Image: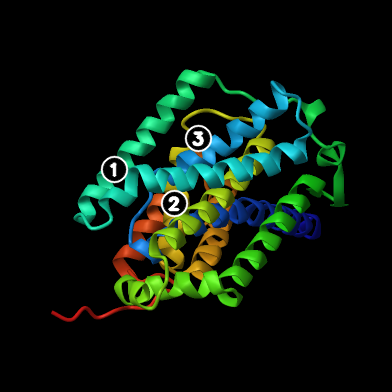
Amino acid sequence: MDLQYLVDSLSLFFQQFVNGLTVGGVYALIAVGYTMVYGVIELINFAHGEIYMLGAFIAYHLVTVYHVPFFAAVVLTVMLCGLFGILLDRAAYRPLRNAPRLAALITAIGASIFLQNVALIKWGAQIRSFPQTSLPSFFGKTAFQAGDVQIGWLQVFMLLVTFVLMLVLHAIINHTRTGTAMRAIAQDKRTAALMGIHVDRIISFTFAIGSSLGAVAGILVGVFYNALWPTMGYTAGVKAFAAAVLGGIGSVPGAMLGGVVLGVAEVFGAGYISSAYRDGIAYAVMILVILFKPSGILGKSTVQKV
């Protein structure tokens, strides 16, 4: 009896851990968008959660209305959301580049509310879902099963997509001229401009990359939970922001790590304590990090000279 209890407990632990990695990978994709923009222009783009939401709905619209194949819809959605990120920067943030930070912050909140209402007008408040016939058939199949532990191909696909995108992002930031320019602007925009870097163009590229990653996250979540709704970006945005703070705001590796840690913590909290505390865990993590390690896990404390 005791041995069976131990086996069941280990099975539950492993199942929850895999679920946490899956959810955490999605949070990491969104958190990277937050932290990239903050690292370059020191702005918390609160409209980023709504781009995540738009990614899910645009893919849904392409699949259900225009009958675009799922993977083609994903590619088109990523491109459209990347373009939308550029337009958002040019319309809402670029005019306030030299304004006080509070002005840009209020604009970001306003953009978030505006996009939520656009989605409500376009798609309504009801929960929608991708038609199962529009999704790849292997999404519903089991990839691995041992006892009570079951991992679906959809989870494997989500983990693989997250891992590949993170590798691509790492390569862009650390091994390309554009990535070098992004890091230079993060250090000092004025000096970077004097060195011949087109600052506004690089910032727009940063928005495009972050928005594209957010769109992928929105699609994955929409398929995984089989549910889309216009305010889904708010909760996910808060959790991803908490993940970025946990990892160290401004640090891309920190955002990745923070997303995974937060996802695992959330799933374990919901599984072993109560699902009612699932969303509260993100707020609790953010508060604890701010209190005890404001720079985050991989963030660096800075001294500001006056």
User: To which residue does mark 2 refer?
Assistant: 282
Q: What is the distance, in whole Å, between disc 2 and disc 3 at their CAs?
A: 15 Å
Q: Is label 3 or label 1 in front?
A: 1
Alpha-carbon neighbours of circle 3 within 10 Å: few (<14), some, or many (≥20)?
A: many
User: To which residue does mark 1 refer?
Assistant: 107
In contact (CB < 8 Å): disc 2 and disc 3: no
Alpha-carbon neighbours of circle 1 within 10 Å: few (<14), some, or many (≥20)?
A: some
Q: Residue at x 33, y 51 (%)?
A: 94
- Who comes first in sequence, dot 1 or dot 2? 1
Callout 1 secondary element:
helix
Callout 2 secondary element:
helix
User: To which residue does mark 3 refer?
Assistant: 232
In contact (CB < 8 Å): disc 1 and disc 2: no
Q: Could you tell me which quadrant the C terminus lies in? A: bottom left
Farthest residue toward the front? 196
Q: Is label 1 or label 2 in front?
A: 1
